[in-house]
Amino acid sequence: MNRFTTVLWDVDNTLLDFAYSQRISLAECFRSIGREMTEEELALYARINDDYWKRLERGEVTKEQLLTGRFLLLFEKLGIEGVDVDGFGARYQEGLGSHYSFLDDSLAICESLRGKVKQYVITNGVTSTQRKKLELSGLWDVMDGIFISEEIGYPKPHRQFFDYCLAHVDEREKSRILIVGDSLTSDIKGGLQTGIPTCWYHRSDGTMDEVLGAGCRPDYMIRDLHMVYDILGLPQ
């Protein structure tokens, strides 16, 4: 018998390389306002964006405030004026949904797990962007369901998000469901709060004790998605 019957996959920086999509999309948006994006500007935006998503997880901002606020702050820090923020943001989201890159052969891994475990996506991303990216990448076709926080009404790590997921998967035993994600503050914390086993996908070097900074300890840690086979108790 498999150790787990169900996998809840995070998308960005787990199945797909978000940094890749972010770089290409933001560069295209900068060109649309007559600028070539620098590495420093990309790094600044990444910090601002990450901070806004953490604030969303804590309930400090709404999704609407995040989508516009991150660019308003970026333009303020760069001294850029006269930009249609809504239009810029819309182009950015369109780009995020159009450009994707797999991490660790994620599509092949998910395809190989079909029929062996149930697989679902759990994501805080913008609905239109995530749906487009999942469809174009082929991940949509190998999943048994898609859970997007914008549609549910609560973002990860809120218990309401995971309670909704639990109510809409076939498996009734939490102990037989595994969350796989890169974020300690949304994926792992959400699982711990809900009583679902968690697997932290963390590609950088360092021991568990060295890299944990969010006050929560996952049940498993992997640096390559192929390692999930052992956790699931399945052959590659």
Image (tube, rainbow, N blue to C red):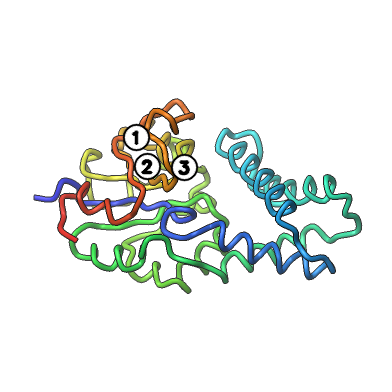
Horizontal side, residue 82 vs residue 170: left or right: right
Element under label 3?
loop
Q: Amino acid at mark 2?
A: Trp
Rendered image quadrant of residue 58: top right
Q: Position of residue 111 (x, y in %)?
A: 28, 68
Q: Are marks 3 and 1 in contact (CB under 8 Å)?
A: no
N-terminal-most mark, 3 or 1 = 3
Q: Are marks 2 and 1 in contact (CB under 8 Å)?
A: yes
How would you rate the neighbour count of disc 1 (Cα within 10 Å): few for under 14, some for 14-19, many for 20 or more?
A: many
Q: Are marks 2 and 3 in contact (CB under 8 Å)?
A: no
Residue at left offset 25%, top offset 57%: 118
Tag 2 residue: 200
Residue at left offset 43%, top offset 30%: 210
Distance between mark 2 and mark 3 Cα atoms: 7 Å
How would you rate the neighbour count of disc 2 (Cα within 10 Å): few for under 14, some for 14-19, many for 20 or more?
A: many
In this view of the protein, which residue sits in the foreground, 27 or 173? Answer: 27
Tag 1 residue: 218
Rendered image quadrant of residue 88: bottom right
Horizontal side, residue 17 vs residue 170: left or right: right
Residue at left offset 82%, top offset 65%: 35
Distance between mark 3 and mark 1 Cα atoms: 11 Å
Element under label 2?
strand
Q: Amino acid at mark 1?
A: Pro
Element under label 1?
loop
Tag 3 residue: 183
Q: Position of residue 136 (x, y in %)?
A: 48, 74
